[in-house]
């Protein structure tokens, strides 16, 4: 059970985090850090989720999965104290764990 959930949503989040646009990544990290600083709360998991037929990141499913993996790895390096879980939501709305770091 979770005591608190916060969501940061950007179109094509997996592609953004896996990419090299440092300005976009910094913007997302600032939002993550706001959640990490929430008083009386120990945020311990970040989920990076991608989904089939994403208009914000129109690539094939395997590319999404690879980007989710890269994004999770990058976040773990940038925020090592937090567990990072990469998730893929298929065209049938089934959730697949891609990685856990």
Image (tube, grey):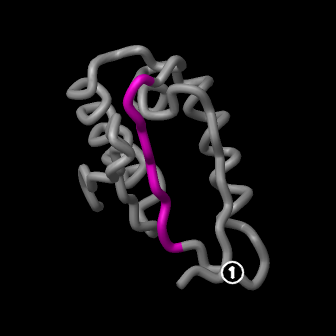
Classified by dominant secondary structure, the portion drawn in magenta counts as strand
Identify which residue is drawn at 31% across, 47% down.
73
Nearest the eye: 55 or 36:
55
Relative to 42, say whether 77 is above or below: above
Q: Residue furthest right?
A: 39
Q: Is residue 1 above or below residue 16?
A: below
Q: Position of residue 91 (x, y in %)?
A: 34, 35
Query: Which type of secondary structure does the marked residue at label 1 adopt?
Result: loop
Q: Where is residue 45 shown, x and y percent of the image? A: 48, 67
Residue at image position (50%, 73%) is 44
Would you say residue 8 sits in the magenta stretch?
no
Quadrant in the picture for residue 3: bottom right
| Residue occupied by mark 1 | 41
Circle 1 packing at 10 Å, graded few (<14), some (14-19), many (20+), is few
Question: What residue sits 28% from the left and 61% below the top?
Answer: 100
| Number of marks present in the image shown | 1
Q: Percent x, y for residue 70? A: 30, 37
Position of residue 68 relative to residue 46, above or below, is above
Question: For residue 93, what is the image quadrant?
Answer: top left
Q: Residue at x 51, y 17 (%)?
A: 55
In the rendered image, residue 85, in percent from the top left (x then y), is placed at: 36, 58
31 with respect to 82 (left or right): right
Q: Which corner quadrant of the image does residue 34 belong to?
A: bottom right
Report the span colored magenta.
44-53
- Quadrant containing the C terminus in the rendered view: bottom left
């Amino acid at each position: 059970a979770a005591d608190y959930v916060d969501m940061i949503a950007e179109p094509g989040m997996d592609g953004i985090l896996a990419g090299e646009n440092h300005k976009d990544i910094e913007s997302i990290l600032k939002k993550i850090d706001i959640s990490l600083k929430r008083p009386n709360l120990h945020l311990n998991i970040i989920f990076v989720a991608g989904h089939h037929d994403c208009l914000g990141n129109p690539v094939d499913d395997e590319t999404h999965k690879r980007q989710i993996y890269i994004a999770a790895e990058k976040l773990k390096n940038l925020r090592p104290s937090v567990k990072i879980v990469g998730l893929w939501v298929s065209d049938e709305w089934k959730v697949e764990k891609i990685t856990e770091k």
